[in-house]
Amino acid sequence: MEGMRAAAIARGYPKIDRFFLLGRTGFVSDDTEQSALVAQSLARHPREKDRFARAFQRSLLGWFLRLPWGIGLGTLRACVRIAVGFRRSGVSSAGNGAAMRAAIVGAFFFDAPARRREWADELARVTHTDQRAVEGARFVAELAAHAMGHDGAGGLEALVEEAVSIVEEPSLREAIQRARRLANDGAPVESASKELGSTGFVLHTVAITTFCLLRFGHDPELAIVEAIRAGGDTDSNAAIVGAWMGAVHGESALPVALMANLHDRDWFTSPRTMTLGGPSHLRALAKDLERARDGTASTQAKYSWLGALLRNAALYPVVLMHAFRCFFEDKMKTEQGQRSRMRMKTDRGETRSSRENSNHKVERCREPPALRHEANAGARTIGPEEAAFLRKYRPADFPRPSVTVDIVAFSIIDAELRVLLIRRGEHPYKGAWALPGGFVRVGEGHRDQGEDLDAAAARELEEETNLRASDVYLDQLGAFGQAGRDPRMRVITVAYYALVRPDLVPLVKAGGDASAADWISVGALPSSALAFDHEDIIQRAVARVADRIDASSIAASLVPKTFTTPELRHVHAVLTGKPQDPGNFRRKFERMLEDGVIERAPGKRITASKPALVYRFRRPMLDRSGP
């Protein structure tokens, strides 16, 4: 399920219970193998940090040369640097490679806070130097350490509270706090994955694993399964959650049946040696680490590098087959969902149609005896009994809240982040400033259930501001449904945020029931004069945009079509609320060029000093999949 989205996993695998790759045998992932190499290096050099790091570098290079089935881009680049001979092998990457193998450092130094943080940082920088990756690894190690020495007071929330106290990087800290809020709200894992992300980006990984720990950590197997169900980088997410579960509950609480089916002895060696990262090898490493803590150097845990190489090479076809299968299943299920949504928009209920193909007539299709019901999960056939039930069903017999959509539209005007507000022309809150929005149109029965949320948001945006959804970046923010938020009745709103280029600002004009529209500075919002709970919605949207600016290319919607480096740096500064160091931003800008996020544009821009190069975003790379 590596690389699949949570929604596709939910549709295709309602029950996750097949934990094997070949026959009835399962294999550990690259995450577990790298953690085993960390444990091996710790056992050999438990007192000398530099020698430990160099030992891990050598082990990692050997692992890389044995053709592993999976490897992150940052780790791959670091391995190449080690092979070339660079002493400082880490690369500027915010991937999760450093975090996925850090728990063992926390467990080993659980009673030595200063040493575990130093060693966790040193281990992280073997492959990753980005501060988010380093602090992500430190957080994983810190949480494992607190779990090892935990007395049960305060539960899992207390562990996270202690671990997050050492996180200084703002975006990482915010990602963890959002995960805590979602877990406390009891959110399902699919919603959490959509909100937090579950890719190999370290902010996504740390957030979704923290969510799984808090939400499902009472049951180790359930927590691991839900980490897989979150989709994305499933093996890394599950590896971190599994490590935490082991630290919290001990080996005896881990799923014995799953571990018993893991490949444990190499096929190609005689006598058959332990498999790197297999159950026997991990238990032997645990004994080595115990002796190392007592001051006795020991390396009883040994494996065959040749056996590992031959096994990897032999199983590559199987691994590739599984990878292609997951890719095409995710693609197929995504297309099925899109076709289902298109059918909902164009044809609800019973249909009659006729078609012509060349000069041949096709007779009119007869209506089937069973009704067709178009639901979010796709089309299904309804039998006569259910059809009779639906005809008699009276929705008015049950309480129903109304649903609205609200749009938080941002733009940068006069070097400030501003939000579009409209002046309400009707009660309630007549005359107050509010966000553009309105009620979702609802149909008259089960055959016509009205418009989709995205369609409602696009319609309200155009009706109340004169902006078309196709001209701006529009994405869903979240639902707000506190009782009493609307004095008329129970109203749940689904908020969206939109990013508007400065050149589109003059096109905005009030429409619908709005009497006026204006762009108000986010730092000078008239909080006492805002309608409903719109201040809370705006603040949530500000945090979302600030959180996503470094993880995606949404800045493309707030700069002109062509821009200079200082202009893009200014956008980042405005959205994050803090100045961007020119040197650091230049390096970030160069990475964006290397990754193909932006590209050179023709011409130059005349500035006060000298003509400046101009750039543009590659529009197809603009995405909505970030945190």
Image: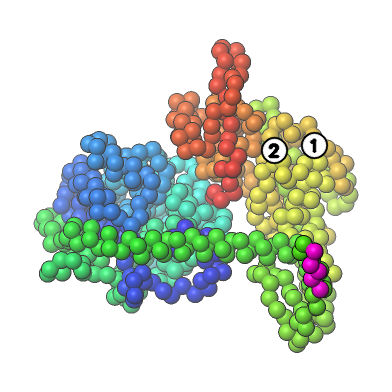
SS of the residue under disc 1: loop
Q: Is residue 74 above or below residue 282?
A: above
Q: Which residue is disc 2 drawn over?
A: 500
Q: Is residue 278 above or below residue 579?
A: below
Q: Residue at x 49, y 65 (%)?
A: 229
Left or right of 414 in this view: 255 = left
Q: Earlier in the sequence, mark 2 or mark 1?
A: 2
Residue at point 68%, 65% (across, down): 340
Residue lying at 74% horizontally and 75% vertically, measured from the top left = 372
Q: Secondary structure at mark 2?
A: loop
Q: What amino acid is labelled 2 in the image? A: Val
Range of magenta residues: 359-363
Q: Which residue is mark 1?
A: 508
Q: Is residue 80 left or right of residue 384?
A: left
Q: Position of residue 12 (x, y in %)?
A: 53, 70
Residue nearest the observer in this picture, 118 or 52: 52
The residues tagged by marks 2 and 1 sit, at their Cα atoms, a distance apart of 10 Å
Residue 6, visible in the rendered structure: no
Q: Main secondary structure of the magenta part?
A: loop
